[in-house]
Amino acid sequence: MLTPEDNEIVSRVGPGTLMGNLFRRYWTPVLLSEEVPTPDCDPVKVRILAEDLVAFRDSEGHVGLVDACCPHRGSGMFFGRNEESGLRCVYHGWKFDYTGQCTDMPSEPPDSNYKDRLKIPAYPTHESGGIVWAYMGPKDKMPGFRDFGTEDLPREKWRARKTLQPMTFMQLMEGSIDTTHPSWLHMFGAAKDIQDDGSDAPGVYNSGMAQWLFWWHDRAPRVEVLETWHGFRAVGLRKTPNGNTHARLYCFTLPYTCGPGGGGFHVPLDDNQTFSFSFDNIHTERKSAGVVGGQGGLAFPGWPYDRDNLERTLENDYLIDRESQRNGTLYTGISGNFGNQDTMARQTSYTDRTKEHLGTLDRKIIMMRRLLINAAKNLAKGIEPPALDASLPYAKIGTPDKVLNPGEDWTILGSENDPNPISSAGGFRIAAPPQVT
């Protein structure tokens, strides 16, 4: 459990908070490039890290991210005109470029130089992999952009998405790195009948359906964690039906990334909601080429996760079906897709972590919290945050799932020291059906 002080630290992300100050020292995903698709397109409202902002793409293609209010009298910049290389407030015509500099003040005398001395609060942006990133910290501390394998990706291969998660940043992060819950939360009665597709053999990188069989067979994985330069790497080790050991890899890179397959970037809108960003990178095709059996499984007899387009939320109790829960068709009784189960479990988990009782399965959660809390406290003492150096090999952070060879060291798998290009491939892969975390 956490102390009340530490629980407060992980729960607050606004300007001036310890965790908010830490987050602002890193480049942060703020919106998708496709949300501002063309020069002079409509402005977009952005809420991130408890700040209300407006994004726009100017006539030259630069993306500006500015305060939601005009510095004159606070009128909403979202209602401004995006024209001729700037966003113009419609109240009195004051215009600002993508850096925040006022470039036109037509309501003032022609000989006034007031506009030259006025800026709207604005954040530097960087586009990569279909995501617009922003640096929201002190300008004199701005680091280089950390490349997770998107800088060399051609624009025609930019594929990214974001989903709104109705929960706190920490609830989402905690759920994303939990390796035990698929054996319970996502389990269904027919999983035990899945046939080995050749994946249950030493040295094989597994298909999605093989993992369901492994999750059913060993429901108490051994969790191990290794602290690294970027945060940590971790594994859930399960015995397979054929007597092998299956390793499901996880990683955490300060401050936003976690989970299997890279997992994505979990960025707080504010203290109560979170965006999950995910994207393809230069390793995506290479990684998928090493998977046995593909991502199939939708035609498997007894597969319970066919989408039915029904909205399941906390307000309607996720349309829980107690009969399917009782008869074992679905362990939870919550269907539609297993993302509904994740959202239910995470959204209803503790935000007051002084009440919880953690076990050995929670080693990753304990490590993640410690790294974040220590980094936030250290920053308040003037100690620079970890994993800011843009020259480090972020693009080589991978999270393969593999049946280990006898004696194989899981800590090498998917690390920058892994000699196997498939295994070491990082990946924020957008797949269908979605990956289970």
Image: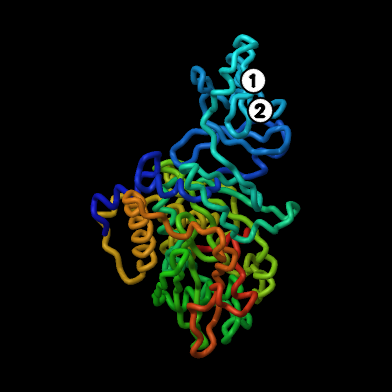
Relative to 355, say whether 238 is above or below: below
Residue situated furthest top in the rendering: 109
Residue 165 in view, yes or no: no
Badge 2 marks a residue whose secondary structure is loop
Q: Which residue is mark 1?
A: 104
Q: Is residue 209 left or right of residue 325?
A: right
Q: Callout 1 environment at 10 Å: few (<14), some (14 to 19), or many (20+)?
A: some
The residue closer to the viewer here, 352 or 328, is 352
Q: Callout 2 environment at 10 Å: few (<14), some (14 to 19), or many (20+)?
A: many
Residue 356 at x, y percent in the picture: 27, 58
Q: Tell me the residue at 35%/51% (across/down).
A: 382
Amino acid type of the residue tagged 1 in the rendering: Asp
Mark 1 / mark 2, whichever is N-terminal: 2
Residue 383 at x, y percent in the picture: 36, 54
Q: Tell me the residue at 49%/33% (across/down).
A: 52
Q: Which residue is mark 2?
A: 86
Marks 1 & 2, CB-CB < 8 Å contact: yes
Q: Tell me the residue at 61%/80% (across/down).
A: 419
Residue 77, disc: none
Q: How many marks?
A: 2
Q: Is residue 270 left or right of residue 157?
A: left
Residue 52 in view, yes or no: yes
Relative to 11, say whether 387 is above or below: below
The residue closer to the viewer here, 413 or 178, is 413
Residue 144 at x, y percent in the picture: 56, 53
Q: Tell me the residue at 60%/20% (across/down).
A: 89
Q: Calculate the distance from the C-alpha at mark 1 to the C-alpha at mark 2.
A: 9 Å
The residue closer to the viewer here, 313 or 169, is 169
Amino acid type of the residue tagged 2 in the rendering: Gly
Tell me the quadrant of the picture where the N terminus can be found.
bottom left
Q: Nearer the viewer, mark 1 or mark 2?
A: 1
